[in-house]
Image: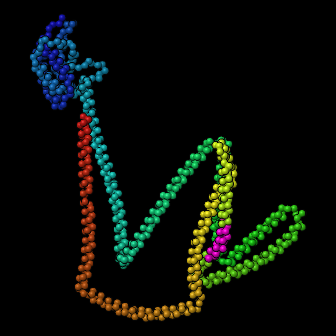
Amino acid sequence: MDRPKTAKQNENSQQKKDDEDLNQGRPSSRRGLRTQQRDISTQEMKLERTFSRGASTISSQDGSGTWRPPSGIARIKGTASRLVSAASQQRTLSVTASPPRLDSQVNITDRLITQQGLSSRARSSGTGLRGPGKRQVLDKRYYEGVLQLKIQELTTEISSLRKDIENSNKEREDFLIYDRQNKERAKELTELQGTLADYNLVIDKIHTGTEMKDIEAEYQALKMENDAEHLKLEQLFKERTQKQQQIHQLEEEIKKERHIAEKLMENMSPEMREKYSLLSNDNVKLQKTIDQIQKELDTIAKEKILLEHQISSSPLKQEAAKLELKLVELEEKRNTLTSEENENDPNNLQQKYLNQVREDNAEIATMERSMNQLQDELNNNKKQLEQIEQDLEECQSDRHKKYVELRKREETIESFLSSYENMKRKESESSTQVKAEIVKMMSAISEHLVTLPVTEHEYELINKELSQIEGDSQSPGKNSICVQFKQKQLYLEKLHTLEAKLGKEMGALEERIDKTQSEIHNFENLDALKDEAEKKRSELLRKKQEFLTVQDHIKEELKNTKQKYEKIQRELQGNETYKQLQALERKFAQIEQDNFAFKEFIADKNCEMNYEKQKKTAIKLMRQYNDDLKEKYKSNLQEI
């Protein structure tokens, strides 16, 4: 049986309970720690007094009869191992101030007592923290306090990072604004530089002596040219857009056709694919050869047109061309005869062709002689023609050219008119034939309509036969005849329009021919023209002599006026008023330059000091920033 506890033991147990209650409180602030230390020091003094009076009686005895040493809590001074709130401190003071109760059920042997006070069990690993200012018991509240400190550090770091982000965003926005303003200012600067260059050009022209009327006329001419160029550019742009649209449509159509061809290729058998690939390769090769031949044909056609143009200028060249054609035909005949002679058996045909060869040789010799004679005549005629052309060019080059052009056009018109009747007759005959064929086809159709079948099966058979006939036959039918008829009608209409145009051109050409003939009639009498030219020349020489005499008189007057001017200038140089006027003029020019410089300086400073725009933008940004801060603050309050 245990003996009853004394009042002091009860008081010590009550004190231990109060200490445990204090250890379970939340961590306090620095001010709370100072008050806590003062309260603990006063409490320790009281405990020392109690332990000094009855230390032997406080200790309890266990079952073995050994005495347990007193608790070391009284010897701890100013420990900060546990953070106690103000409420817990008041509770401990009230507990210590209350008198000890004898009926408490607390047993001292239930708690561990060490020399350093209350603590956990000693561990062999030695992980407990010792020393001043360190916690000896790392409980839940300690780690909560550490977490709170880390959270505070993180919040401060996050706030600083947010501020940096906001500053960077503001700087970015400011940079964008300044960049846009810089671009606008650069555009304005380029425009102003252009206007300044224009003004400088105008000033230079005024200084050089050009009048404002000339400058305005030049300005109007340049404006007209620019407007015309602008219209041309717009028209070209429209044409380009139209061409691009057409190209786009054609590309889409090509894609569709390729897609259809690919589908057909997929549905083909392998043999058909091989045939298709071979035919496509042949098609590509043939297309290349066709392109080459077409290019050669184009070049030959151009050469032919040039040669025809050269030949049509003179009848002698036309005759020479005809003779050359005859010569070519004869050479072809000779070649054919020689080839036939070589191909056939010479033993059988030797006697037959000997006489023919002799005759042909004689004919060729005579033709060569005639050709040489014609060539000589042609050369002589060419020389005469060149001499005549040179004489005409010396007399009248431009009008001769016009006359030659008119002669060419007249020849072309005459050739067309000569062949017009034949062409018209041929076209009318072809149109009558087409009309007759159409009538025949219509009558045949009407006859077949009478004998049409009645049942659907017969209709289907007829349709199949027609499809087979259309697929097999490649000869021109009704559709081809209709197409030809339409083409002929269009061609006939074109001929009528050409006939009307040619009538008009013929009237105009006749008028021109009359004019040229009248001019030629005027220029036929060269002696009269020479006499008129001599008269004009003598008159001009006479006027020249008169002007030379006047020039000498004017030179003398100019010399006298120069002497008078130099005399007046010397007198002015010696005059004091003139000197004062010159000095005042120089001073006035200097003052004007200074005034202009001051005006430019004032304008520059006004531009630099004009900060109204920046002020407005800054106030606007500040208001936006304040509104954003208010909204963020409200959202944070709502979240809290």
What residue is drawn where x is 56% and y is 80%? 511
Left or right, residue 147 beside residue 277 = left
- Asked if residue 513 can be seen in this view, the reply is yes
What residue is drawn where x is 20% and y is 7%? 65
**Camera-side residue of 37 and 636:** 636
**Camera-side residue of 484 and 338:** 484
Position of 428 relative to 211 (above/below): above
Q: Which residues are magenta?
A: 410-427
Give the image location of residue 152, x and y in percent: 25, 34
For this orientation, the residue located farthest to the top is 1
* Residue 61, picture quadrant: top left
In which quadrant will I find the N terminus? top left
Give the image location of residue 110, x and y in percent: 21, 13
What residue is drawn where x is 30% and y is 44%? 165
Position of 630 relative to 177 (above/below): above
The answer to if 93 sits in the magenta stretch is no
**Camera-side residue of 611 and 228:** 228
Q: Main secondary structure of the magenta part?
A: helix
